[in-house]
Image: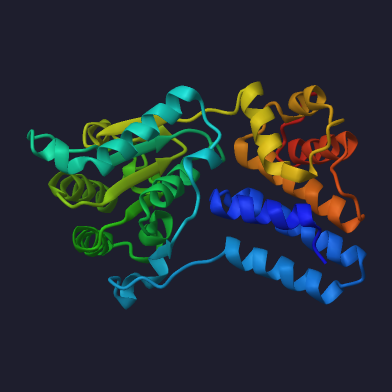
Amino acid sequence: MATAEQVKALIQTHFADEREQFATIALQLAAHEARQGHTALAHDIRTLVDRSKARSVQIAGFNQDLDDLVISSQPRYRLGDLIVSDDMRNRIMRILREYKQQDKLKKHGMDNRRKILLAGPPGTGKTMTAAVLAGELHLVLHTILMDKLVTKFMGETSAKLRQIFDVIRVRRGVYLFDEFDAIGGERGRDNDVGEMRRVLNAFLQFIEQDRSESLIVAATNNPRILDQALFRRFDDVLYYHLPTEADIWRLIKNRLGRFRSDGLMMDAAIQEGRTLSHAEITQACDDAIKEAILTDQDTVSSALLESMLQERRSAYGKDQG
């Protein structure tokens, strides 16, 4: 069965609401049980962890026409789970502080910032930020799949957008418009079509008229192609970048958790992680943890972590030569 230290660690991370650390310890417990020959219990623990990570909730308020366009979930991420610069962390904290004290602001005729544009390369924390906002504020995260909306309902996208904004008005939550450049491209570009101009104009109108208590978050990998009229409709614009060396160190430390040994050569791992995004480094750490579990190791070795980081660089065409 679980060791005393593992039980204490599980209790500690649960009450500290450290979701990723809790999952890491649970996986370590599964590996321990597997080594004891308790394969069924180990399998059940891994299944519970997987289900927890994929946990979603059914949210009332969306009609059947929008079900396949919106993914609703109840994130448990907290600001401590997000690896970003101090400046970015302070700006996210400002959004949270203003939301929590919006009544105080309204007494002075001021509104809290609710409409946020997140811009930057893939895998740098934009979607995670939306989940953190929802988790910190105990709100449901509704992810609107913009590329699917446009592809499936070309010709009636504006009507679907209106339905979504109607829900935003009556159901408070965090609404993430993912892959926002699917509709936010600059008007008048050579590949522009009349329908997309109408969709963008509709979005500009809806977001400008919105007076709800929801947070509206748009995420884009290509801010340079966005229509300039969009930027002034948002209360704040946050730009994301690839992780610094300090960020890489924190990412590896947090992700490996108790699988990180004192002898891990972090300098070498950091060099291997350069040019990779936050998500790619996280995936490499997860690959290393799984390999350690399957080979009955309690920690991730330096060679294993570096190998997994190299695999990610190769997979994404980011070899450093």
Q: Which quadrant does the N terminus fall into?
A: bottom right
Vertical comparison of 182 with 172: above or below: above
Apparent side of residue 143 relative to residue 5 in the rendered image (left or right): left
Residue 56 against residue 302 in the figure, above or below:
below
Q: Is residue 139 left or right of residue 121?
A: left
Q: Quadrant of residue 262?
A: top right
Task: Look at 37% across and 34% down and name the residue there.
Answer: 93
Decide if residue 53 is on the left or right side of residue 99: right
Query: Is any atom of residue 205 visible in this view?
Result: yes
Tell me if 161 is positioned left or right of 279 in this view: left
Choose between 182 and 167: the one closer to the eye: 167
- Above or below residue 296? Residue 266 is above
- Picture coordinates of residue 36, whole percent (x, y): 92, 67
Picture residue at 18% right of the left edge, 50% below the top: 206
The x and y percentages for residue 26 are 71, 59
Residue placed most toward the observer, 221 or 59: 59
Residue found at x 42% / y 60%: 148
Residue 179 appears in view: no
Q: Quadrant of the C terminus?
A: top right
Of the pair 95 and 225, the residue shown nearer to us: 95
In the rendered image, residue 247, in percent from the top left (x then y), is placed at 62, 27
Q: Which quadrant of the view contains residue 294?
A: bottom right
- What's the residue at 73%, 42% (across, down)? 256
